[in-house]
Amino acid sequence: MIRDPGKQCVLVDSHCHINFEPLCERMEDVLGNAGKQDVAYMLCVSVNMEDFPAVLSLAREHPNVFASVGVHPNETSGREPDVEELCALAAAPEIVAIGETGLDYFRSHGGLDWQRDRFRRHIDAARKSEKPLIVHTRDAAADTLQILRDEEAAELGGVMHCFAEDWHVAKQALDIGFYISFSGIVTFKSAHAIKEVARKAPIDRILVETDCPYLAPVPFRGKTNEPAYVRYTAEHVAELRGMTLEDLAYATTSNFFTLFSSANR
């Protein structure tokens, strides 16, 4: 484990879904490609209970892959874990976080109390398991932040993953102790607000991710994303901040192991 990476270019894909098709069908290539681009570690994130065993298996098979446990806010057809089950699953040494969880009002409509209740259960599980949160929010920033405040999530810490909001939202998330993670969206020409956040956010509170197989960065936009491509996101964020890639990699890698402290295994 890297505890003092120096100024090596060592990157972490802090949020990926390599258990999804088509990546799971060519796992050796995916992991090999990541290594060639200095992506030394990745966090494979759970979205439902049905696929969680595959996520956990990947982390057990590959020492540079970590895992989380949780149910995505848009999931409606799978099994709903209670707090006790989430905590029991989070006790596995490969599990470094609870999530992804949060709110999504873009894909889900109507009465969404069930989504807010699920979010609160995940926060409770994070508190009891002493693992940080991976938070997804879309068209629901105000409610997401309010629930995090109401549930005193600042005590737990976590990350606003695939950040796609403006500086006003970012500042509120930072104020409650959360990290901001940038995906390939930040490389898109139209992403002016996200680029502003990438410039302004404190260097010790940012991460980079792919959210693969989705949201490939420029120059791969529209293609299947994979952990190797997090380098292009990191390069773009470094350019926006006037930093070298090596310095950005050092910061985001150190931030990852600070936030997900149980990854220091």
Image (cartoon, rainbow, N blue to C red):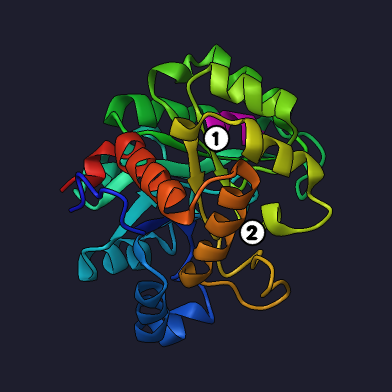
Q: Residue at x 76, y 46 (%)?
A: 108
Q: Residues within 10 Å of mark 2 (few under 14, many from 20)?
A: many
* Mark 2 or mark 1: whose residue is earlier in sequence: 1
Element assignment for label 1:
helix
Question: Which residue is label 2 attached to?
Answer: 184
Q: For the magenta stretch, what is the residue range?
A: 114-119
Whether residue 45 is visible to the viewer of this picture, yes or no, is no
Q: Please provide percent x and percent y for residue 23.
A: 49, 79
> Measured along the vertical axis of the image, is residue 115 above or below residue 38?
above
Indicate the quadrant where residue 24 lies: bottom left
73 or 229, which lies in front? Answer: 229
Element assignment for label 2:
helix
> How many numbered marks, from 0 up?
2
Q: Taking 201 as reference, is 263 left or right? A: left
Q: Residue at x 44, y 62 (%)?
A: 50
Q: Residues within 10 Å of mark 1 (few under 14, many from 20)?
A: many
55 or 235, which lies in front? Answer: 235
Indicate the quadrant where residue 157 lies: top left
Q: Residue at x 30, y 25 (%)?
A: 128
Question: Which residue is label 1 attached to?
Answer: 118
Is 116 colored magenta in this rendering?
yes
